[in-house]
Every structure is written in C-alpha cells, then in structure tokens.
Amino acid sequence: MATTIRIVLRADKVNKDGLCQIAVCVTANRKRTYFTTGVRVHPDNWTGTAITSNVDNSNLLNAKINRRRNEIEKEILTNELSTGKDTQPADIATLRHSGPKGFHEYAKEVLKNYTGGNLRRWTVEQNHLLNYRENLAFADITPVWLTLYHDYQLKTLKHASNTSISAFKWLRIVMSHAKKRGITQYYPFKEWKLPKYEQPVKPYLTYDECIRIQGVLSKDYSDEIKKVAAFFLVECFAGIRVSDWGKFRIEKLIHDNALKVGATKNGEPVYLSLRDYPILAKVIKYMADNNLNWTEPQQHARTVLKSIAIIANIQKHVTTHTGRHTCATLHLERGFSYEYIAQLLGVSLKIVGTYAKMTRQKLRVESERIGGF
C-alpha cells in the first residue's frame, strides 16, 4: 500500500496562546505518524496546506514546513529504494531518530532557518567549530568539552569573554533543535552555564583630548579630516548621534546664540547656550564659515576618526559613538545632574549610567559641593 505524506494542522496540540502545531503526517498501512515542523499557527491563519499571507514571515514559515516535509519524503524514498519494499509503520517510527548524526551535518540544516545578519553571525560561529573539531558527534559535547572550547575561544582565537558567548548560543540553538528531533537526548547546558555577559567599559575623551582634536581644525590637514573632526566635536560637547550628522544644519539649529540639540518628551526644544560652551562655539563658527554638511556613510567617519586619534596623540579606541560618552562624562564632571544629561542625550535616566563615567574630577566636584562629615 502506498505511503501518503500530508502537512496538517493538529487541533489537539494547542498551546496557551491558542496556536496549533503544524506537523507532517505520514500514513502507512492506515497507521498515522506525526512529525513536528517546529511551527505553530492560529487555525484562522491556516488554509489547509499553508499559512496565510497575513501572518508575519509567512513565506519563511511555509518554506520551513515544506523543507521538513521534503526531508521526510526523501528519507522514505531512500528507505524504499534500499530495501526494495514499501514503507511499513515500523519503518516510519525509525524516521523519528533518523537524520544526520554528526553535529556539523545537522548544524548545516539548522542554518537554513536563518537569513541576513543572523545567518552571517551563526555561519561564523559554525566555521570556528569546524576548525576546532572537524568530526564532532553530539555525544562529544559534554560540560568538559564546553569548558575546553571556551578556553580555545579565549586563548587561541583571542576572543573577549563577551564575544565567546555568541559561540555557545549557537551551540545551544543546534543542541535544542536536535533534542526536539530526537537526534540526541543529552543537553549539556543544564550542567554547564553560559558565561555571563559583562557590560563593556566604553572609552571617553578628556577635555584636554577634545582640545587637541579642536587644534586639527586650524592646522594644515585635509578638508575631510577637518570635517570629521568638527562633527565629532559637536557630538562630544552637544551629544548628537552620528546618525544625526547628516541632519545637522546650523541655519536651522542656532537660535539666539544657542544650539538646539533635541526636544523633551512634551516637545519643548533643548538648547545649549554657546556662551557657556566656548569650544563648541568655535567649532560651530568653523562649520558655518566652511559650509560643512555631512553626506558620507558612518563607516567613512569611523575610518577617518582613527587618523584623527593618531594626529591628536590619543591612545584610545575612538569611534563615532565615543563622542556621546564624552559628552555625558564631561557634563557629569562639571556637576550637571543625570536628569539634565538624559535630556541632552535624549535617553532615559536608566541609560545615562552607561554613558557617563564617574571620574576623579567628578569625585572632587562632589566632595567640594557636599563637604565632609
């Protein structure tokens, strides 16, 4: 008797959100066997053969369902060709545990579920695993093996602790998929804990370092270096984002000798008086005199900033985001409140702490303001 393969919605497999399991139903000798596809959908969004187009990522979900169906059909056909017999219910049962047994072979199948940035990210991690251990079985991945691979990430690949976390996220994804498919029953992450993510300390510039960058504007350097230096200094003193460099128009942002840097939640504009920011005032004047506008991509600014850091003798990893950290820290040093800095940067009070750094200058200011006891 011929074997039939259908994609079905299992109304008997409903989760707490009312989503039903989509499964591949294989019938042999009138006995049905179900294989999960890993996809759930509301019954109203199921046509009988596919997910309706009004569901987010419906094309990807339908592709995933059909891929699972094709995998099972291929395994059944392979079994029939090798045995020369029709598929029996007992043969169907073995498919639950069939498929690639090697980790790398199975990981290739899991990668097919991803696109874009996630696909690139997990492909990099998978290549690291291949280089570390070419023949890797699921049974090899134990807590001890994970510890050794962590050492490899840190010592051989020279990855930072936070960077290495991505590798174990990928391992965990593949192991979870394999466990659901019945390829492996062991899940080592129950015993081996993922390294904790540590909030990295972002660099900021001191006031003197900002002055050194300002000096670039009056020296014989290329127009491109001077332009990047000018926009970066506005970021350092006014806190504008690099994504807003292209929107920065002096004729629209200067009012009564003050620079508009944003708006409060109720729409009220936030201004910086240029009388209180003499360096910023000089930079703004330079930009106006030279009619500077930003049209280049952010990557160009990052590249030029590396040269500016060398010119200004700044021994730090300076990026386009360093300016906002500098802005927050300089204002904190001078006694401005967290509330003021939050308004200036356009972030919440909770986020201000990731930008503003407590420095010796700030400690001295607080000590002089409050006094001892």
Image: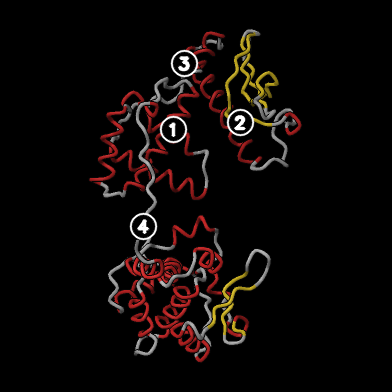
Distance between the Cα atoms at labels 1 and 4?
31 Å
**Category of crowding for the residue at label 1, using alpha-carbon neighbours closer than 10 angstroms: few (below 14), some (14–19), many (at least 20):** many
Residue 39: image tag: 2
Q: Nearer the viewer, residue 3 or 330?
A: 330
Q: Which residue is mark 3?
A: 82
- Amino acid at the residue labelled 1: Val
Residue 174: image tag: 1
**Category of crowding for the residue at label 3, using alpha-carbon neighbours closer than 10 angstroms: few (below 14), some (14–19), many (at least 20):** few
Distance between the Cα atoms at labels 3 and 4?
60 Å
Whether 129 is drawn above or below 139: the answer is below
| Secondary structure beneath label 2 | strand
Earlier-in-chain disc, 1 versus 4 = 1
Between marks 1 and 4 in the image, the one whose residue lies nearer the viewer:
4
Distance between the Cα atoms at labels 3 and 2?
31 Å
Residue 201: image tag: 4
Whether 38 is drawn above or below 158: the answer is above
Earlier-in-chain disc, 3 versus 2 = 2
